[in-house]
Structures are given as C-alpha cells and as structure tokens.
Image (cartoon, grey):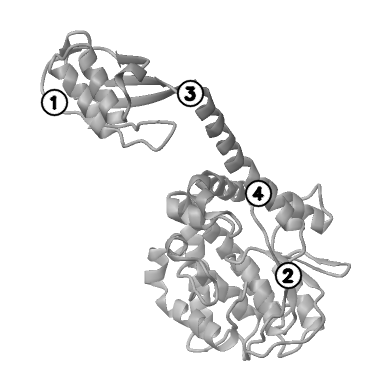
Amino acid sequence: MQDVAHACVGRPAGLAAGVEGGLDGEVGLEIVGEVVRGEAGQGLEPVAQALAQAHLDGAAEDGPCSLACERLGLALEHLRHLEVQELGALGAAAPLVVTVTVPIPMPVMVVVVMALIVVAVVPVVVGAVHGLLPAASIQRPSCGGGATSLPMTLQLYGMRFSPYSEKARWALDHHRVPFQWHEHVPLAGELALRMRAGSLGKKVSVPLAIDGDVVLRDSVEIARHTEKIGKGSPLAPDDAASQDWDARSAAALGAGRVLVIRRSLEDHAALRDSLPRWMPHVLRGVSTPIAANANRFLLRKYDAEGIGSDAARETMRQQLLALRAALGDRATLASDFSYADLTMSVVLQMVVPVDERFIRLGDARRRAWTDETLAAEFPDLVAWRDRLYAEHRAAHSV
C-alpha cells in the first residue's frame, strides 16, 4: 500500500520551464493544493516551496527527494518515488505537480482502514439503536418551576436544538404534560423513527410524539393533544389566527434551515459540535464528514437543495416584517400569550439564538445559527422573543 502526497505549485503566466533542467525566470509560486498523508500532514507550503526551489537551483536529482523527505518526516530510503510533472502547454499558467509516493506497512494500513470503518459505520448503527431504546423518564418542570406528578406516558422524539421540536416541547411544558425525551439523529436515526411512527415507507419528521396508541406527527398536532390532556391557560393552536401564524412560521423556518445548514457546512467547529452527545470525544474531530452528510441529507429531505441563501433570507425577512407590523406596541399577538406567539418566537432562533439555558448550542453552533443581516434589521423582535422566554418558558433539562 502507498501513501501519496501531492504538492501543486502554481506558476506565473509566461514562465517558460523545463522540468529536466530546472526552471527559468522569477520565482512567483502560489500554493493551491494540500499534502495528503496517512496521518496529519504538516501543510503543503514548506514541501512545495522546497521542491520548487530545489529545481530552480538546479539541484541534483536526489536534492528534491532529500528535501521532500525532510519536510514529510521520512527517511530517504523509504521514499519510493518522486515524480515532477508539468501540466499544460509551456508558457501557459500551468501548475507544476510534484507527486511523492511513500510505502505504508500493511499492518498500519489495516489499522487505518479499520479506524475509518469505525468512524463511518458505528455512529450510524449506534444512532439507529439509540432511537429504539427507551429513554429515561424526565419529570418536566412547569413554567412556574414546580414539578408535575402526572403519569409518564407520552414519548417525544426530536432534536433539542431544533425550533420545530422547541414548539412541541414548549406546548408540553406550558400545559405541564410530562414526557420521555428521545434525541433524534438525522440520517442515522431515520429507520428507527419510521419504525416508531409505523411508517416504514413514508417520510417522517420530528417532532414526533406517541401517547399510547396515538401518533402525533408535527408540533401543531402535539399542541392540540396537549391542549386536551394538559393543564394551564389555553394556547388555542386551532384558532384561525394561530393557524395563519403557524403557516408563516413554517415558511420562515424552512428558509432559516437552509441558511443554518449552509453556514454549518462551512464551519468545521459547528459540524463537530452538532454530532450526537453520545459520540466519544476522540471520534468527534474525525467524524465531521458524517455531520456534513447529515446536513446535506436534510436539504435533500426537505427539497431545499436548490434554494439560494439570498432567496431564503428574503423569505424570512418578509415573515418577520409581517410579525413586526402585527405586534405594533403589543406584548403578544393576541390578547394573551398563545400558540401564535410561540410559533413565531421560535423563528428568531435562526436570527439570534436564545439564551443557552433554554436551548444549548455552544459557541460554534451559535455562530452558525446567527444571521447577522437579519439580526441587524430586527433587534426589536429578538428582544420581544427574549421577553416571551423570560415570562413563559422554563429552562430545558434535556
């Protein structure tokens, strides 16, 4: 087995060159690639610059080899092959490609392959099994801070950071309905979720609640159910105004999801922090491709791959402008706190995340969930959301 390190050095236009006899002309090299190794490399620039300079200086054939070995931390006798190849016509702005091939002992390669299998497969298997295992019973606090002693029957599946799941949890907490929480893992937990919902052949999303024989497939259904079985003041999710605001919330959240996913895909730390809590810390750094695939899966699942960031942001903006106009100087959309307030306040989670005591994200994910453009335009709505949380929301324990 071999480990191949590629160094790609950009060469200025008009620089005539001959690989065999060295390079003529000024040195104006630009690094455009990276070193690929069986273990973490030391970066491309020192290796590529050393190799290029060796050719410019007309070094002996083993000169570049020695420099490559030195930079890559290899003994000269372990270097299998050094190939210097120029691509494109002479005189064009073509790159100089240097390929260093190094043998890797078979035992080491076996260990590397097994490690890759563990990283790629184990999280998927554990995620599926995790979704099927019963969660520990959680006695939820009421908004007043007291605990309820109602029998624990309702099972709630969701993602603790998701605004969609937050709507369901908020309704349950408002009506002091206890529940068992099951953390859903996108992609890895899809099969388990479908099995729980009894819909193996259909698309299933979270939040999903199961109360005995009753399957509740979204936050509105969950809110209606808790309105019937819970306590406290009504939220009126079936009210015409609440339904209208929930439709606006759905449009805004769908657009916000596109923005959050696209920012997350560009932020390695945010991807790492989005991995399930049960994943060992030692695997988190190398498992970010799994998190990236889960994010891309969500874009495909909700048919959002073709939606651009500008269009998504404008969709959110229009819904927030409607909220601002409806609120005016009032504290709530209706005469009292209702489902309309609840469903629109969670939209602001994708503008500026709420305080960590309500939804825990961590610094990296808070960065990915923050839209600076919308945050600058709607600070009044962010403040309105914060007041609602302070007055009507209990801190989370999951």
Residue 293, position as x, y percentages in the image: 57, 45
SS type, badge 2: loop
Tag 2 or tag 3, which sits nearer the N-term? 3
Category of crowding for the residue at label 3, using alpha-carbon neighbours closer than 10 angstroms: few (below 14), some (14–19), many (at least 20): few
Q: Name the residue carrying label 4.
A: 187
Up/down of 6 relative to 91, above or below:
below
| Residue, far left | 26
Category of crowding for the residue at label 1, using alpha-carbon neighbours closer than 10 angstroms: few (below 14), some (14–19), many (at least 20): some
Instruction: In the rendered structure, find residue 105 and report the number of the disc placed on it.
Output: 3
Q: Name the residue carrying label 2.
A: 136
Going by the image, does 255 lie left or right of 158?
Answer: left
Alpha carbon distance from label 3 to label 2: 47 Å
Category of crowding for the residue at label 2, using alpha-carbon neighbours closer than 10 angstroms: few (below 14), some (14–19), many (at least 20): few
Alpha carbon distance from label 3 to label 1: 38 Å
SS type, badge 4: loop
Q: Name the residue carrying label 1.
A: 27
Up/down of 179 relative to 42, above or below:
below
Give the residue at x 63% y 91%.
Answer: 144
For the residue marked with disc 4, what is the amino acid?
Answer: Leu
Going by the image, does 84 lie left or right of 112?
Answer: left
Asked if marks 1 and 4 touch (Cβ < 8 Å), the reply is no
Front position among marks 3 and 1: 3
| Residue, far right | 213
Quadrant of the snapshot with the C terminus? bottom right
Tag 3 or tag 4, which sits nearer the N-term? 3
Asked if marks 4 and 3 touch (Cβ < 8 Å), the reply is no
Q: Is residue 86 visible?
A: no
Frontmost residue, 198 versus 104: 104
Give the residue at x 41% y 31%.
Answer: 37
Residue 275, position as x, y percentages in the image: 56, 55
